[in-house]
Image: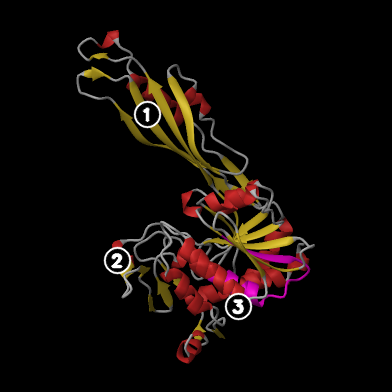
Amino acid sequence: MSDRDADADRDTTAVPDGGATAPNTDGLRALTRELVSIPSHEDATAAGDAVESWLRSETDAAVERDDHGNVFARTGDPDAPTVALVGHHDVVPPAESQTTVGDDGEERYVIDERDGRLYGRGSADMKGAVAAAMCAVRDADPDGVELCFASFVGEELGGVGARAAIEDGFAPEFAVVGEGSTNYSGEGVTDVVVAHKGRRASTLVASGESAHASIPDEGDNAVYRACDAVDVVRELDFPETTVMGERVRGSVAVTEIDGGTAWNVVPDECEVTVDERTVPGERAPLERAGSIEGVEWRVEQDLPPMACSDDAFADAVLAAARDAQSGAPEHVVKPHATDAGWLADAGTACVICGAAESGEAHTDTESVSWAVLDRCYRIYRGVAEGASAFA
């Protein structure tokens, strides 16, 4: 980094915390810029290389890269409970406006800075929070715990990296997952998510017998059977539960229907897709639709919901979030599935706390606030250094 870049990375920035100013974390901006500029929608290897290289050169942590491409860094007491700061360095495909080709002929993501924000694919979801967690691991003095940083691959593909890591034995007692939790309870506030919905994607396959449409009674109309199944889905109650006093309400919706081959042929097959947003401990009884004669229910994807299993941990992270900002963060619920679902399902007490705001991820104008990234750094470091409150 040039002297000029280093000075820019230490500029004081107005933060939305009562008008105060605070120095940016050393290296956070430069690291975030670097990570966001690296393409990682088709292959996250280069982004993983950058994460691993920085951790090895800038921290005293024990750094590991597994066979799946996940990156880990550990510091503190290896015999104590583990607090993990978790993220992912893969992203969804960029818009055409978010890519460019450098002088070396290599694709890069376009980054832009204005109005206190960094724009670029992955800035919000979630390389900015990954960078904040990396800096926290570099600087924190863990309070009687092992502090672990983990950045997974394949989160955008259903948690491929997290699931592989869990199968290989990754099992921290506590985890702060850096997905978005900003502006949930109010503008300019970074909250702490104690629960999120999961997603179960299903297909109802109705089978029948084809016939000429002029003699429909000689066939068995698969569309009619599919419609009977849709009627069952329509009448199902949405799953609902409460986590730490927060209401979590799921949903069930038919989203596609496909059947028939010609206007004059009774269809012998019809498929219906169902999107279900699951909640911790509750599922809609979709098997009822599969009990109709000639209808098979197939589960295509099942991303688990998350509920924090440790009140003291959730309260400690909320306390760290309060200390890091002048706003009044709250325990909140997130509507989207994340890698926290896989970790919670494996027994880790999880919360979510990160810089991304609702509506930023996966957009053509994706961006993240520098001030909120600074805040997340303070939260992550505060959790590690205040672990005696829950560990």
Whole-percent x and y of residue 157? Answer: 47, 50
Query: Foreground: 217 or 18?
Result: 217
Point out the frontmost of discs 3 and 2: 3
Residue type marked 1 = Glu
Mark with earlier residue (1, 2): 2
Vertical comparison of 246 with 317: above or below: above
**Segment tinted magenta in the rendering:** 131-151
Question: Which numbered circle lies on residue 271?
Answer: 1
Quarter that holds the C terminus = bottom right
Looking at the rendered structure, the kind of residue marked 3 is: Glu
User: What number is the disc on residue 97?
Assistant: 2
> Is 47 situated left or right of 214 in this image?
right
The three-letter amino acid code for the residue at tag 2 is Ser
- Estimate the x, y position of residue 218 in percent, counting from the top left: 28, 8
Tag in front: 1 or 2: 2
Q: CA distance from mark 3 to mark 1?
A: 53 Å
Query: Of callouts 3 and 2, which one flags the residue occurring earlier in the amino acid sequence?
Result: 3
Q: Of the numbered discs in the image, which one, if any, rests on residue 58?
A: 3
94 lies left or right of 74: left
Q: Quadrant of residue 133?
A: bottom right
Tell me the element at label 1. Answer: strand
Q: Is residue 3 visible?
A: yes
Taking the spot 51% from the left edge, 54% from the top edge, the residue there is 155
Depth check: give the residue in front, 3 or 350.
3
Q: Earlier in the sequence, mark 3 or mark 1?
A: 3
Residue 145: say if magenta. yes
**SS state under label 3:** helix
Look at 59% across and 72% down and name the residue there.
55
